[in-house]
Amino acid sequence: MVSRHAPATRITSGRVVGEAVRHQSSGVNHPSADLAVDDRCPGATTQGMRTAVIGTGTWGTAMAVILARMDRPVVLWGRDPAKTATLDRERQHPQLPGVVLPADLRITADPTDLVGCDLIFWAVPTQHTRAIASILPLPAGVPVVSLSKGLEQTTLLTVTGILGETYPDRPYGALSGPSHAEEVMAGHPVVLAAAGPDEVGRLLVERLHGRACRLYTTTDLRGVELGGALKNVVAVAAGIAEGLGLGDNLKAALITRGLAEIRRLGRAAGAQDVTFAGMAGIGDLLTTCYSRHGRNRALGLAIASGENPLAFLRRQATVAEGAWTCRAATALAAQYGVDLPLSTQVEAVIWRDAPVQAALDALFARSPKEEDA
């Protein structure tokens, strides 16, 4: 039990309540953010119920495609009317070339198109989640499942923690695991952890579980979100080691010790240790660190080549969340009194202009420890 270190979110009866301070810099008063509509569609079958995906990035689009290919009614919402109109007209995502979006996938920027949905997937990047939530009304009481991975810089909240402050009184969940959008769009099967209270887990299994998408359920929402956030930081370190040509041995060692950091912080935050041995832990960590599609691995490779990390981030069309998560993770770890040496050095390289060699030297200069310490 943690006494003086309060966790960033509290999960009570499947509802998420944010405990960290609210975002102070936006100056936005959050609306009730609920559409007062009977969105449960009494009498509808599971096949007839409609799912919404918020966010037209690669993973949000891929999730919408999974649902459409399963003949589930689905609407994909984006904030920019011009971009959604282009996506709707051309039926191809600019970052996912060669795959035609299903004809029955509705793409919109109109919030009223969300009315009637009984399940909402949230695929907005973590650092933009609060801003989008402040302007987007959602149907009242409908479960929201996060597809996004990260920690908010100012509050250290996970995505469901942020959303719980804006959209209270609804169940929350998260889907996480090895899930590069490029492979999903190509039709390859995907296996994910579905986290949340029992009612959310049942809904996700009914809606998604099948030959193309296998789900393993867990009630450990905290662990699944922390694992999904911190694996991106480890992937940056793995990319640096790979880019420097330091060999498979060291890369594997960094990944292993990165997993130890994730477990250490997870334990302190009340997560279940077994979560990090599953899809949202080692499963997601491995694919992020080794896949050619990995954005955070790509950031590490760029750093190893001598490129300025912030300049690299500015020119990317997609988001490498590990760059921001490393700062939030070390701050959260300080609240719990937990040591995250790998995350600390990644933060130093990206945000404090520390030389990569100095960061490596600092890691190897640490005193001997027990394997799990």
Image (cartoon, rainbow, N blue to C red):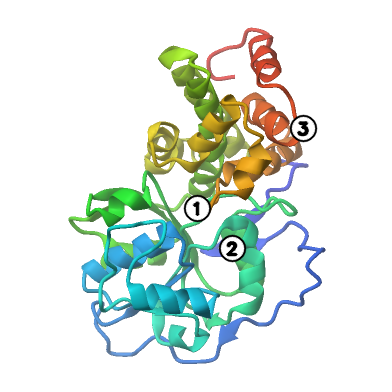
The answer to whether residue 62 is left or right of residue 129 is: left
CA–CA distance in space, label 2 to label 1? 10 Å
Name above or below for residue 339 compared with residue 214: above
Q: Secondary structure at mark 3?
A: loop
Please say if the residues under marks 3 and 2 sit with CB atoms less than 8 Å apart.
no
Residue 218 seen in the current view: yes
Identify the residue shown where x is 75% and y is 30%.
353
Circle 2 is placed at which residue position? 16
- Name which of mark 3 and mark 2 comes first in the sequence: 2
Circle 1 is placed at which residue position? 221
Name above or below for residue 199 compared with residue 271: below
Please say if the residues under marks 2 and 1 sit with CB atoms less than 8 Å apart.
yes
> Within 10 angstroms of label 3, few (less than 14), some, or many (20 or more) residues?
few
Q: Nearer the viewer, mark 1 or mark 3?
A: 3
The answer to whether residue 373 is left or right of residue 200 is: right
> Where residue 259 sits in the image (x, y, percent)?
50, 29
**Looking at the picture, which amino acid does disc 2 mark?**
Val
Q: For this rendering, which residue is in front, 306 or 278?
A: 306
> Within 10 angstroms of label 1, few (less than 14), some, or many (20 or more) residues?
many
Q: Quadrant of residue 249?
A: top left
